[in-house]
Image: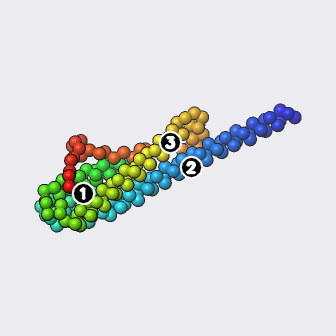
Amino acid sequence: MMGGWIFFILIVVVALWFIGVYNSLVRSRNRVDEAWSDIEVQLKRRYDLIPNLVNTVKGYAKHEDSVFTKVTEARTRAMAATAPQDRLQAENMLSSTLKSLFAVAEAYPELKANQNFLQLQTDLTDTEDKIQASRRFFNGNVRDYNTKLQVFPTNLLASMFGFTARTFFDIDEKGPEGQPINVSF
């Protein structure tokens, strides 16, 4: 009789452990998803600012059509990308083309004095800062989630229930040739 109770208690403890670990994995996965949503909000804000920025620069730098085309194409690709790796590449390309756009603006002093351009530049800088903060938050959650998936014995339960590792969202901070671009306004 005593052995039956011990076995029952052992089964209950193991079941509670399974439930606790499973719920912990679900909470971690949900935090990663929420953090990704924060990034998407900031990226959408950046996508919304870009057409205004391009149009403002276009008014002063009429002979820079290739730069405007590249920025517009990169924005379109970034907005259309859905897979994390595709999104990462598209965002890197967009960041690179935006740096080229600001480099073009350097050649036009009257543009640098335009209040609309200055406001758009400030808004874009603020948005980039928010993207960077959201990215750090996301990557921290991904790190914690992936660590849970890799440590024993949680990894056994994670693989049983189909939890998969997530990819970090790291944007290349260098220019298209791999060299940093210095732009001062």
Compare residues 175 and 181 and report the one nearer the observer: 181
Q: Position of residue 166 (x, y in %)?
A: 46, 44
**179 w.r.t. 66: above or below:** above
- Where disc 3 sits, the SS reads helix
Tell which of 174 and 108 is nearer to you.
108
Say few, some or many: other residues with alpha carbon within 10 Å of mark 2 (under 14 / 14 to 19 / 20 or more).
few
Q: Residue at x 26, y 60 (%)?
A: 121
- Gap between marks 2 and 1, in whole Å? 38 Å
Q: How many residues crowd mark 1 within 10 Å: few (<14), some (14–19), many (20+)? A: many
> Between 122 and 82, which is closer to the camera in this rendering?
122
**Label 3, residues with CA under 10 Å away: few <14, some 14-19, many ≥20:** some
Expressed as whole percent of the image width and height from the top left, the position of residue 49 reads: 30, 63
Amino acid type of the residue tagged 1 in the rendering: Val
Tell me the mark number nearer the camera, choosing from 3 and 1: 3
**Residue annotated with mark 1:** 71
Q: CA distance from mark 3 to mark 1?
A: 35 Å
Q: Is residue 109 above or below residue 22?
A: below
Can you tell which of label 2 and label 1 is closer to the viewer? 2
Helix, strand or loop at label 1? It is: helix
> What amino acid is at disc 3?
Asp
49 or 113, which is in the foreground? 113
Name the residue carrying label 3. Answer: 144
The circle on residue 27 is 2
